[in-house]
Amino acid sequence: MLRPSAPESPMALPATDSTTLPVADSAANARRQRWPWWPLLPLYPYGRRRTLVRELLPGRLWSFEQLQGVWYVAVPIRMTVLRLQEGGLLLYAPVAPTAEVLEQLRALETSHGPVRTIVLPTSSGLEHKLPVPAMARAFPQTQVWVTPRQWSFPLRLPLAWLGFPAGRTRVLLEQGLPHTDQLDWCPLGPLDLGLGTFMEMACLDRASGALLITDAMVRIPSDPPALFDLDPTPLLFHARERGDEPLLDSPERRYRGWQRLVLFANFLRPAPLDVSSPGEMLGDCLAPGCRGPRAHFGFYPFRWRPGWQEEATALMASEPAGLQVAAVLERLVFPRQRAALVRWIRQLAALGTLRWLIPAHYEAPVACTNDDLLALADRLEAREWAPSEGAWAFLAGIDRRLVNLGLVPSQGEEA
Ligand SMILES: [Fe+2]
């Protein structure tokens, strides 16, 4: 299959490419990219977090992206850095503060003033919560703001026990809101998930029209994000047809790997996929070119069925806005919460003039108007919600089991 040519990016800004920071792969970089707290949430790429820094809006907004995922199903996770009008910087949804990240933040501080505020904009997203204490320690003068209804699993621990600085941590809404001269805040939730509460705080920078969100909406690009140029291993791993194929690199393989990776990330177990027999699995293991941990010693127990590309293409954004609720969230987090989600999207559309959406995953910035959000809300209301057939069957099975075990509520209710 030939890789289609990349579409003209509607959100590309002149400054974006020219300010991408080149990162050479060297031992010195490995030290700068070390993340010692990875055992607390052991996700790929574990103890080494490469970071892509991009200027999204010149002099105003920057993206710090790292890869994060399970079994090479890794997607970008993003911290957004916003320049404050009063001087200084706000960090929204921190990523792992490696030495490399801190160097880049210190460089921004030199031009724009100190980091003043750190925001944890979700109550449940562990991947966003875990970096916050370390980031707060790196900037001891900052005020830390967290979304209400924080929780931890398996034990409910107070924030101070999780490393949040007790003397300078405040709860959004309950103890005020930061920088309201510049920012509007809009919560989704709290929504009762049974095991805990879902809540997300969106933040609109009125002057730039940039709306910062966390997990609830994404735009999945049809091409692999530039972050994979720093580490294409996840793409090459999933591009193979069998476990005994070595990890070879080419644009076509990266594109195929991205499509499959997106299917795994959205549906956990994509429908057009067969699991190999134990004999096939063993036969693939330790094949020449696969005898190392990078290829998981040849362990890749899947065979993709013809037609899998159509499932992947359906998930990829085909329009400039191209916003969606990720399937895994729709079926496992919001299956009975469509009304609350749609209401929130309409509230966002009423906040002020929107120009950009900056989610914490996948693509950013996404060109997005108020009408784009209203159109998304209408689409979500009009179509079937959280289906159970076809590609959705595996997610639906998980949801059914959780409901039957009484771990999640069977009715959609706000917490
Ligand atoms: Fe997230």
Image (cartoon, helix red, strand yellow):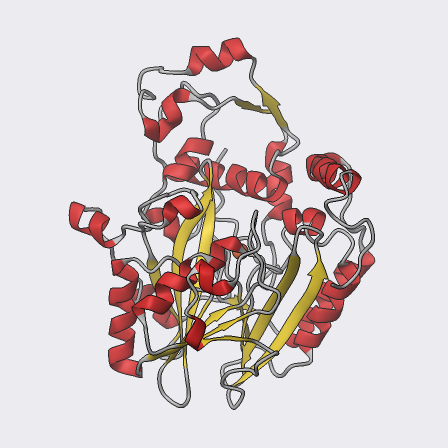
Give the answer, above or below, for where 30 lies relative to 10: above
Is there any visible trace of residue 245 in the rendered image?
no
Which residue corresponds to the image point at 53% horizontal and 12% vertical from the top-left? 278
> Residue drawn 51% across and 54% down?
126
Q: Quadrant of residue 381?
A: bottom right
Number of numbered discs visible in the structure rendering: 0
Closer-to-camera residue (2/235): 235
Q: Position of residue 412 (x, y in %)?
A: 80, 57
| Quadrant occupied by the C terminus | bottom right
Instruction: Name the foreground residue: 117 vs 269.
Output: 117
Q: Position of residue 231 (x, y in %)?
A: 33, 44
Residue at image position (26%, 72%) is 106
Residue 321 point in image, percent of width and height: 60, 64
Q: Residue 142: give x, y in percent of width and height.
A: 37, 77
Q: Is residue 115 above or below residue 68?
A: below
Quadrant for residue 373, please give it: bottom right
**In the figure, is residue 154 to the left or right of 163?**
right
Pick the front one: 120 or 273: 120
Residue nearest the viewer, comparing 328 with 350: 328
Residue 329 seen in render: yes
Q: Is residue 114 above or below residue 232?
A: below
Residue positioned 56% across, 13% down in the render? 277
Is residue 24 shown left or right of residue 15? left
